[in-house]
Image: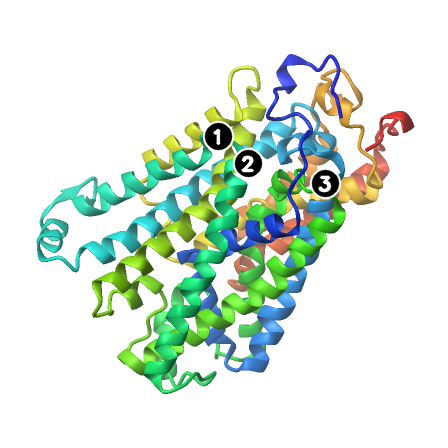
Amino acid sequence: MEIRNPSPGLYNEDLAPAKVRNWGAFSIFNVWTSDVHSLWGYYLAASLFLLCGSFTNFLLAIGLGSLLIFFLMNLIGYAGEKTGVPYPVLARASFGVWGANLAALVRAVVACFWYGAQTAAASGAVVALLIRNDSMLEFHKSTQILGHSGLEVVCYVVIWALQLLIIQKGMETVRRFQDWAGPAVWIAMLILAIGLCVKAGGFSFDHGIPQDVLLAKTKDAGVSGEPGSFWALMAVAATWITYFAALYLNFCDFSRYAKNKDAVKKGNLWGLPVNLVAFSLVAGITTIAAFKVYGEVLLHPEQISAKFDSWVLALIAAITFAVATLGINVVANFVSAAFDISNVFPRQISFKKGGYIAAAIALVLYPFAPWEGNAANFVNAIGATMGPLLGVILVDYYLVAKGNINVAALYDENGEYRYEGGWNVNALVAAGVGSVFSTLLPNFTSLLPAWWNTCGWFFGVLIGGGVYLLMATLRPRTAVAASAKA
């Protein structure tokens, strides 16, 4: 739709409702292949597969968890398809035209952290390949820069720079990259899995890994208790669902370009429950086969490729998984941060400039590497910060506004979504209360049981959304004008 006389502080061409909507189900599907098929995603999927204890338990934990992911992504995806606006603009309806900047910056900060983590993972795959060469191995061991080896720093900067090239020409370039990278990674993964299964004498769901070794190797996945037990399966499902916490918020950044609602639904169906279960299954089978071939638990694909005798095969594997990780960085982190930062200063910062700022922050964070250490704590702590935001946005859109958004008013600083000086107190209070229980108490105090941290995102969604619904009932919003509904 055409936005007439928008407020300058709320509008630029990148934040305007999408004019070209040509993303079909295949492009939506490849949003998820790009998002899931990363080194982090592989590690988590393989670990959780092994911790399920059996194929039946895997279907229960990962399968049901993937269905819930599909349901939540449809909720936010339909809102993006209907309104045509990106996440920070959609957030104006619930947080206010200026309050949405707070919700956007929280997501942007998370994106910058993940941007650095994924870039480090991709560069690690390249390092694993290069140190097969004796001179490179010597350089890797002998040179230290900013707390990392010189080779790691060089590879990080190169991978970091390559990502900037993808985003140069905007979202259509992102779509083309996804449509190529997603299938390519699947082909490489299947070749890797089949090759290892042949060497292992066949595939098996029974890993045969001693439990003490399994628990030691998968400790970063954050699943406590005996593998296959009820509480372990609950933790597996919770961690898997929380892994996608960032995209629950900003999937509308992509669904806004969808041809129609059906394209979103079909793309999500194949890209989420079907793709997620298949990806986790292949990652698990590959890890089991690698254990039987090499006698080691190798949860990272670059560790497996490092075992290859052929330099050519190792090169193909390293490039493939580096490209896969570039894919998730562009989808989950670069695009989101670009829109979120642009939303704060739309007159000065375009989508492209917002992405450059996010990339620069990730570069500055690299020496400190806040993503290193316990992977599950990183995933859950980062994810928990976004639970209350999602709860508020979904409750506002579906239960309070009944799916009716005045799109034109999203760009009017004196319009319907001004609330109290541009801030919706209801949303701020609800998100604040939700954050206390999702992030502050479980991560910075010992007042709550240890298992609470694994489920922090869920508590954030439920408490944040519940408080918002209560406050919206006590302090109702102004009704949307019928002529402006989207």
Q: Mark 2 near mark 1, Cβ–Cβ under 8 Å?
A: yes
Which residue is label 3 attached to? 81
Mark 1, secondary structure of its residue: loop
Earlier sequence position, callout 2 versus callout 3: 3
Query: Residue 401 at x, y = what percent?
Result: 83, 37
Q: In the figure, 335 relative to 140: above or below?
A: above
Q: Tell me, yes or no, if residue 104 can be seen here.
A: yes
User: How far separated are the C-alphas under marks 3 and 1?
Assistant: 22 Å
Residue displayed at 16% across by 60% down = 132
Which residue is label 2 attached to? 172
Mark 2, secondary structure of its residue: helix
Query: Residue 399 at x, y = what percent?
Result: 82, 44
Q: Residues within 10 Å of mark 1 (few under 14, many from 20)?
A: few
Q: In the figure, 91 relative to 272: above or below?
A: above
Query: Residue 375 at x, y = what percent?
Result: 41, 57
Q: Which label number is shown at residue 459? A: none
Colour setting: rainbow
Which residue is label 1 attached to? 169
Residue displayed at 43% across by 55% down = 38
User: How far separated are the C-alphas under marks 2 and 3?
Assistant: 16 Å
Residue displayed at 67% across by 59% down = 269
Looking at numbered disc 3 in the image, what kind of residue is underneath it? Answer: Glu
Front-most of 407 and 461? 407
Q: Residues within 10 Å of mark 3 (few under 14, many from 20)?
A: many
User: How far separated are the C-alphas under marks 2 and 1?
Assistant: 7 Å
Q: How many marks?
A: 3
Q: Tell me, yes or no, if residue 365 can be seen here.
A: no
Q: In the figure, 54 relative to 120: above or below?
A: below
